[in-house]
Image (cartoon, rainbow, N blue to C red):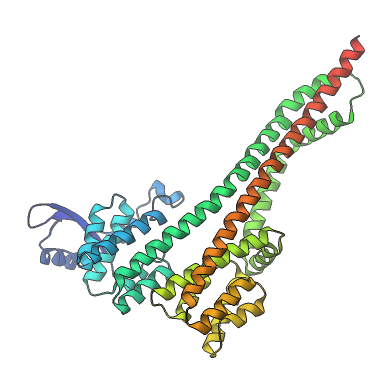
Amino acid sequence: MPVFAYRGLAANGRSVAGVVDADSERTARGKLRERGIFPTELSEEEAAAKRHSLGDYLPSFGRRIPPSELSLLTRQLSSLLGAGVQLVDALAALADQSTRPVAKRLLSQVRERVREGTSLGEALAANPDTFSDLYVGMVRAGEAAGALETVLNRIADFSENQAEFVAKVSHALTYPIIMVCVGSAIMFFLMSYVVPQVATIFQQSNAALPLPTVILIGLSNFISGYWPLLLLSLAGIIAGITYGLSTKRGRRIYDTWLLRMPYIGATVTRVLCARFARTLATMLQSGVQLLPALASVKHVVTNGLLADAVEESRTSIREGHGMSHPLAQSRLFPPLLIEMIRVGERSGELESMLERVADAYEREVERSLDQLTTLLEPLMTLAMAGVILFMMLAILMPIFQLNQLMR
């Protein structure tokens, strides 16, 4: 059904704006008049979307709700419902107080669908780019159980926990990445611009140059002479890797290689297992059945091998068996996770066991990242110092030789 954006005046004379679902512009005006709104501007959003702007040719910055803001909106909606505010009124209040246009428009669309009798879960499912299967599934379970306020609070807690965990991982990797990029840029500048000028002076002396100087000049000549080819080669490698990861076979090779890498593979496995356990525990606590929960969690586990193992566990559950056996057979999940799931299935406390194992793996990941950064920082400093020392020797040794010859 088309969506119309409107601006108008309410019965009390206050300016209002929002969106309304209707078959035609005439029907939209009729719906607005029934609500006591007299529209001054009315336009179909689909037609407006066809008008191109600069933002259409740029990345989707500002056209999606950031996870932190979505978490805040979720918690605010839970608070309003807990205070006894009706769902439609709560959504309207959130839309009015939102300062981000994309959030205002999205909340208005959800409110209109709910006003017309659609459940909140179905209204959210119409916007899959913003609301994931996990989010929608938990909301549907909360509506079915009559505990929407509680479920929304759990979604907000889960989103904040995941955002904090991702921030810790990103923070731990930021310094090494910046060091590599800055160091590479500096080395490229020195080798392509500074060293060739110094090398010209050495070559004019017609003296025998030391081996480090010969190596440095050779590398400099290669980089300064073939830098366009090097950049094209780098772009080709990046494009090839990107294309390979977009194919099923290439993605499977990458997932296998990543899990088999020393140290990094174990850390990635812990990260994915923590995400798997935390997400599944949150969905089960919200009242989502195990099979639908696993279907949503499978998309959270971004490694294809682990996702296949989760799918096999769903098949095992359909056949009347437990979840732990197929996960153990895959030999990809750590023994601690398998044992905790097995104990949880036997005791009927699967949610609490998953929460415990998620806490344990998140702590292990933090320790692993701390150790990794503690090890990388001095290693990268030593590597940079070694490169600088080599360049200094390569430049200073011929100068010392020239001084001795002049004496």
Instruction: Residue lying at the far top in this picture: please name it.
Output: 407
- Location of residue 225 (image quadrant): top right
Q: Is residue 291 above or below residue 250?
A: below
Q: Residue at x 67, y 75 (%)?
A: 331
- Relative side of 15 to 354, left or right: left
- Location of residue 196 (image quadrant): top right
Task: Please say whether residue 216 is visible from this viewpoint.
Answer: yes
- Relative side of 174 to 279, left or right: right
Q: Residue at x 57, y 86 (%)?
A: 316
Task: Please say whether residue 333 is visible from this viewpoint.
Answer: no
Instruction: Residue lying at the far front in this picture: please name it.
Output: 347
- Location of residue 288 (image quadrant): bottom left
Instruction: Residue lying at the far left in this picture: please name it.
Output: 12
Q: Residue at x 80, y 22 (%)?
A: 200
Residue 303, how many percent across, how many down?
60, 67
Q: Is residue 185 above or below residue 76?
A: above
**In front: 225, or 285?**
285
- Relative side of 37 to 344, left or right: left
Residue 400, how many percent across, how many down?
86, 18
Residue 202, how many percent across, how many down?
84, 21
Residue 41, how many percent across, how many down?
18, 54
Q: How many marks?
A: 0
Q: Residue at x 71, y 28 (%)?
A: 193
Point out the image quarter for the N terminus.
bottom left
Point out the image quarter for the C terminus.
top right
**In front: 331, or 29?**
331
